[in-house]
């Protein structure tokens, strides 16, 4: 059975593209389009990894990350921040809320896959 990855982004096309890429690499993919849905799915499904956009409707990615990382039940789930904002301050804030990695858009699919392998294996 493949590992479960939750992909959270409000750009539908991007989510579909990432989902196909991950499924081709043997992962089970769950998706969410906003921060609220992301929290609900993360708590219900306990994915092995979360790919989390920062600019989300309802609850932004920083808050979602912080809420999961400060919860004993979910803090072990690696979170990859996924954003078009590449400033150092954004990365620093991502680290402060507990993000385990940072991928900037547009991204190289191979970079995303190797970062996932690094965090949770194949």
Image: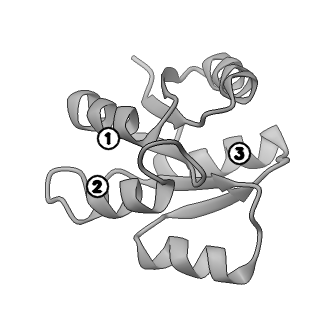
Colouring scheme, one of rainbow, by chain, secondary structure, one colour: one colour
Task: Give whichever of discs 2 and 1 has the lower sequence position.
Answer: 1
The label shown at residue 39 is 1
- Mark 2 residue element: helix
Residue drawn at point x = 47 percent, y = 46 percent: 120
Name the residue located 15 percent from the left edge and 51 percent from the top edge: 73
Answer whether labels 2 and 1 touch (C-beta < 8 Å): yes
Q: In the rendered view of the protein, which quadrant contains the N terminus?
A: top left
Residue 104 percent location from the top left of the image: 76, 57
Distance from the alpha carbon under mark 3 to that under mark 2: 21 Å
Residue underneath mark 3: 112
Disc number for residue 93:
none
- Kindly identify the residue that appears in the image at 27 percent across and 33 percent down: 40
Query: x, y percentage for residue 25?
Result: 65, 24
Give the mark toward the camera: 1 or 3.
Answer: 1
**Quadrant location of the C terminus in the rendered image:** top right
Can residue 22 be seen in this snapshot?
yes
Q: Which residue is mark 2?
A: 68
Marks 3 and 2: which is nearer the front? 2
Q: Residues within 10 Å of mark 1 (few under 14, many from 20)?
A: some
Q: CA distance from mark 2 to mark 1?
A: 8 Å
- Local packing at callout 3 (Cα closer than 10 Å; few below 14, some 14-19, many 20+) is many
In terms of image quadrants, where is residue 90?
bottom right
């Amino acid at each position: 059975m493949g590992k479960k990855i939750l992909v959270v982004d409000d750009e539908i096309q991007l989510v579909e593209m990432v989902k196909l890429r991950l499924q081709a690499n043997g992962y089970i993919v769950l998706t969410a389009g906003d921060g609220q849905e992301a929290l609900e799915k993360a708590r219900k499904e306990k994915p092995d990894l979360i790919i989390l956009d920062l600019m989300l409707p309802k609850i932004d990615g920083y808050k979602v990350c912080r809420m999961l990382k400060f919860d004993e039940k979910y803090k072990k789930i690696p979170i990859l921040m996924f954003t078009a904002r590449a400033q150092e301050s954004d990365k620093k804030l991502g680290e402060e809320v507990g993000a385990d990695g940072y991928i900037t858009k547009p991204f190289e699919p191979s970079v995303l896959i190797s970062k996932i392998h690094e965090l949770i294996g194949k």
